[in-house]
Amino acid sequence: MKVLSRFYLAAILAVVALVGAGAAWAGIGQPSDWQIGPQGPVTEVADDIVGFHTYLLVVISLITAFVLGLLVYVVMRFNARANPTPSRTTHNTLLEVLWTLGPVLILLSIAIPSFKYLLFQLNIPKADLVVKATGKQWFWTYSYPDSKFEFDSLMLTDKERQAKLAKDPKADVPRLLSVDNELVVPVNKVVVVQVTGADVIHAFAVPSFGIKIDAIPGRLNETWFKARDEGVYHGQCSELCGKDHAFMPITVRVVSQQAFTAWLEDAKKKYASEDTPSAVKVAAGQ
């Protein structure tokens, strides 16, 4: 039994180390090589999701270790050699209560925090900025209703990425995630995103913000985030929407309030005077 106890302790420590390593490997704003955990969170909602994911993984791992230990104990304790005269016991009230009550308590320990986090996500706070994201085949259109302008956001082709890298070799333009026109928002402000679809069902998702919501034609859904760190955060359409589903990324640039105000003034002039970018740039296989 001492050997088994050491085995379980080692297994638990390995699980904890694996969870910690996964969190360390996960990048912020985009996927990382060898990533096994969620992307680094930059909002309270994402904090809750990552924390709940870790908690749930530990609970499931402990249950698995317990069941494995129980099976090993039963095999060793009640095999024909160790127990030549088997018991004829058919009922045990205490055990029956425990194996009924135990799973109920485990499910409650999972359900209660999940309801709390869902309520926090679905209660939309007062917005500092409202933007509208419309999913189309296969790109996104962003509009700023208060400023009365909109623009299309299309994935950069490989040729466009190479041109950017030629100008700036250190530019952060990940393949299949970079776009020509980014959604720009201020840091530490509540941004409410109104999401809809123009043709088929899409889904607006940015992992580091902890947001994922369907873009349904004829329906306006809402989600929100409050990014605490400046930077560039990538997401993708997360609903299979057609042949170029894999080529409609989401890029959100979080900047200071001063930088956002300056960008907003320039954007009003740019998108009021120029035609909306063409939607035919994204081709299959890019």
Image (cartoon, grey):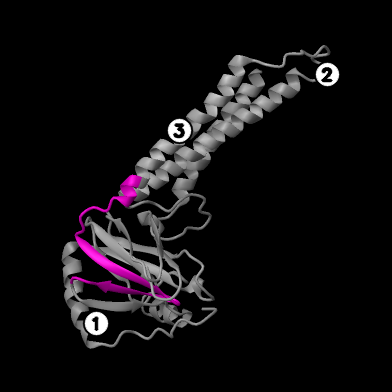
Q: Is residue 106 left or right of residue 121?
A: right
For disc 3, the marked residue is 108
Categorize mark 2 by other alpha carbons within 10 Å: few (<14), some (14-19), many (20+): few
Q: Is residue 266 left or right of residue 161?
A: left
Which numbered circle lies on residue 1? Answer: none
Residue nearest the observer in this picture, 76 or 232 = 76
Amino acid carrying label 2: it is Ala
User: Which sits in the foreground, 279 or 286?
Assistant: 279
Q: Residue at x 54, y 30 (%)?
A: 103
Task: Name the residue type under label 3.
Answer: Leu
29 within the magenta span: no
| Disc 2 target residue | 80
Question: Are circles 3 and 2 on residues that touch, CB within 8 Å?
Answer: no
Of mark 3 and mark 2, the one earlier in the sequence is: 2
Quick check: 241 above or below 276? above
Q: Secondary structure at mark 3?
A: helix
Q: Which mark is residue 271?
A: 1
**From the viewer's perspective, is the residue at label 3 or at label 1 nearer?**
3
Residue 1's spot in the image, x, y percent? Answer: 66, 18
Nearest to the eye among marks 3 and 2: give it.
3
Give the residues in magenta: 119-146
